[in-house]
Image (cartoon, helix red, strand yellow):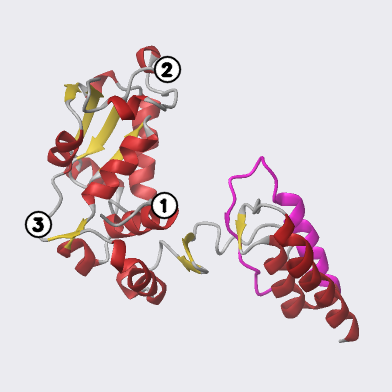
Amino acid sequence: MALKLLVLGFVKAYQKLISPLFPATCRYYPTCSNYAVQAIEMHGAFKGSAMSIARIIRCNPFVSGGVDKVPDHFMLHRNPDTINHIYLGDGMTIDPNDEIVESDELNRTIARVEPKMVIKDEPLDAVAELKEIVDISERSIEVLPDAYMAMNQRELLSRRFYSSEETLLEQRDFHFYHIIKNSKSEAYFAHVHPSPIHKDYQSGCAVCCFLDQNTGYIETNSPLLEETFKKARGISQKDLKERNALLLDYLLFLESTPHDSH
């Protein structure tokens, strides 16, 4: 017990005196120091310290990070039970395999960000919303590489916009647009990412947009356009009532993007 308290004291001293001197760089939730405290409290000084060292080693620039909670039993690798969990901010996570409507954490998140939510009476018309923001020229989705289409379909399924691949194939309403550069859209061309679509977009000079009208899912090489679209899109009363994937996507956007509520 004395050794456990001693090790915990070192970790908490680090959290109080040293950690605030450096910018936040941890790729996981909970942070490595909080993980260490929890691991030592749950598994003792020796096992908990070993788990903490293993966590620090795997928290590096070559991993995508995510939720990695301390497991109930001793292990030195990432907790497989929380690897697919989504961090909602403010210490809250959600398991996408659970029924979203039953999540207490989701309800607490809604209560926290409600003042800056845009809630509309009518269901989303994603294409009409995009046309309000920029002038667009539709291109055939047939020009999109199979790998790019597969990437977006994986995103739609993993984030539960569709319950199954069969439902996705039946209900999807995919569109691909070229954003016309003019005074209305000039700001969205200021910072664009090279696109994986094809050579016409890889230079980062053109802005393109993949949109699913059915769900409001957007993928574009202009971060500002995506932010503006999601901010204007908001959610409908129906989304809020159903606690669906679009609501979860919107909450994650509100948590990750600093912006006002107007």
Of the two numbered discs 1 and 3 on the same chain, state the one appearing first in sequence: 3
Residue at horizontal 72 percent and vertical 79 percent from the top: 42
- In the image, residue 72 lies in the stretch drawn in magenta: yes
Nearer to us of marks 1 and 3 is 1
Circle 1 residue: 258
Q: Is residue 79 left or right of residue 128?
A: right
Q: Which mark is residue 202?
A: 2
> Where 233 sits versus 145, above or below?
below
Q: Residues within 10 Å of mark 2 (few under 14, many from 20)?
A: some
Q: Is residue 236 left or right of residue 217?
A: left
At 23% from the left and 26% from the top, the residue drawn is 177
Calculate the distance from the C-alpha at mark 3 to the C-alpha at mark 2: 37 Å
Residue at the location (25% across, 20% down)? 181
Q: Magenta stretch: give its range.
A: 46-73
Q: Please provide percent x and percent y for residue 253.
A: 37, 52
Visible in this render: residue 184? yes
